[in-house]
Amino acid sequence: MNHWLFKTEPGTFSWTDLKKSPQKRTAWEGVRNYQARNFFKKMNIGDLVFFYHSVVKPLSIMGIARVVKSAYPDHHQFDPASKYHDSSSSMDNPRWLMVDIEWVEDFNPPVAREQLQSEPGLKNMMLLQKGSRLSIQPVTAEEWKIVLSIGKHSKKIAVL
């Protein structure tokens, strides 16, 4: 199993939007970066995803989602009316992909970026690297465990 982090601006698509989606599932569409697209190719059904809100305060991991459909062509690239249209992509050789994800679990409270930055074991996490702007990022197994422990710790603090 692989682990991932998906960044999104809540004004575009939020954690709440995912939870309100039919069956708490959505297609993760509109990714137009080759490296992120290549990460989609590596995703398998069952891979787990941290859902990260960017461009808000505080920047936070809101919870966990799961890949429920592996990479397939993003149909928006073929639609001239779509903001994701790509006239140089073809049905025979689609350039852009998407995956489907579903809600699994909330972090309550969310895990703030500041918490991640204060954890020595996460110093190499792609999310925390200067200039890292990719919306789809791999997360190592060790990073995954550390973030989970922070999330669980936060839940315990919220209960006390």
Image (cartoon, helix red, strand yellow):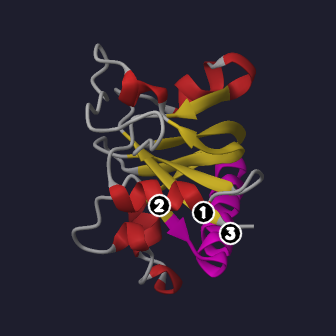
Q: Using the rendered image of the protein, determine whether residue 106 is visible from the camera's viewpoint.
A: no
The boundaries of the magenta stretch are: 138-160
Residue 157 falls within the magenta-colored stretch: yes
Image coordinates of residue 3 in percent, x first then y, are: 64, 64
User: Nearest the camera: 112 or 76?
Assistant: 76
Give the class, few, some or many, for how many residues have Cα within 10 Å of label 1's Cα (few <14, many ≥20).
Answer: few
- In the figure, is residue 128 to the left or right of 130? right
Q: Could you tell me how far apart the alpha carbons at marks 3 and 1 are, in whole angstroms?
A: 26 Å
Q: Using the rendered image of the protein, determine whether residue 80 is visible from the camera's viewpoint.
A: yes
Mark 1 falls on what kind of element? helix
Mark 3 and mark 1 lie on one chain; the one further toward the N terminus is 1
- Tell me the chief SS of the magenta region: helix
Amino acid type, callout 2: Asn
Question: Outermost residue, top direction?
Answer: 81
* Disc 2: which residue: 38
Amino acid type, callout 1: Lys
* Disc 3: which residue: 149
Give the class, few, some or many, for how many residues have Cα within 10 Å of label 2's Cα (few <14, many ≥20).
Answer: some
Question: Outermost residue, bottom direction?
Answer: 120
User: Nearest the camera: 30 or 133?
Assistant: 30
Mark 2 falls on what kind of element? helix
* Disc 1: which residue: 42
